[in-house]
Amino acid sequence: ACKYLDTTFACFPAEAIVVYWADYGRRDTTTCSQHRPTHEIQNAHCPNPTTKVADSCNGKSSCIIEASNSVFGDPCPGTYKYLEVAYDCDTWRWSTPARVSASKTL
């Protein structure tokens, strides 16, 4: 999501979000570059890995995060940033562990 936009992560109701990684910064000059001045997108070496998305969204079926400096801090002032997230939806996070019982006769 481009800066100042909300990003919605959603899974089916019986699934849970599992965030693999998230980055708020800039790693290229093309993502979220439309109508931006060149000086705001030329710093393509501004990665800012973050655990805030995982902390807020893991285990939920849906989650909304704003891509903003107020949420993630400002890793590179003057650079227009965006939020990239790799996540999946897993059903096993919601399943309850099976009960196992065993008996042994001596």
Image (cartoon, rainbow, N blue to C red):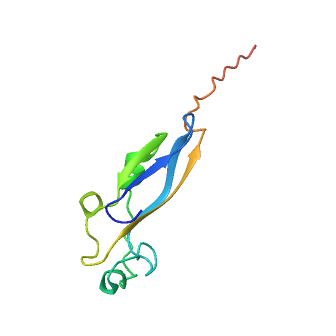
Above/below status of 40 relative to 72: below
Q: Quadrant of residue 104?
A: top right
Horizontal side of 80 relative to 97 (left or right) equals left
Which residue appears at 67% of the width and 20% of the height?
101
The quarter of the displayed image where residue 94 is located: top right
Tell me what residue is drawn at x 47 percent, y 49 percent. 9
Q: Is residue 42 above or below residue 99?
A: below
Q: Residue 99 location, x and y as percent?
A: 63, 23
Q: Classify the position of the N terminus by image quarter.
A: bottom left
Which of the pair 31/101 is nearer the observer?
31
Which residue is rendered at x = 46% and y = 40% of the image?
A: 60
Q: Quadrant of residue 26?
A: bottom left
The picture places residue 57, in percent across and down from the top left corner, at 42, 46
Up-down relation of residue 22 to residue 76 (above or below): above
| Image height of 41 relative to 106, above or below | below
Q: Residue furthest right?
A: 105
**Extreme front residue here?**
35
Of the pair 31 and 71, the residue shown nearer to us: 31
| Residue for point 43% across, 77% down | 27
Number of numbered callouts drawn? 0
- In which quadrant will I find the C terminus? top right
The reply, left or right, for residue 78 in relation to residue 83 is left
Q: Find residue 63 and report its horizontal and vertical position in percent.
A: 42, 45
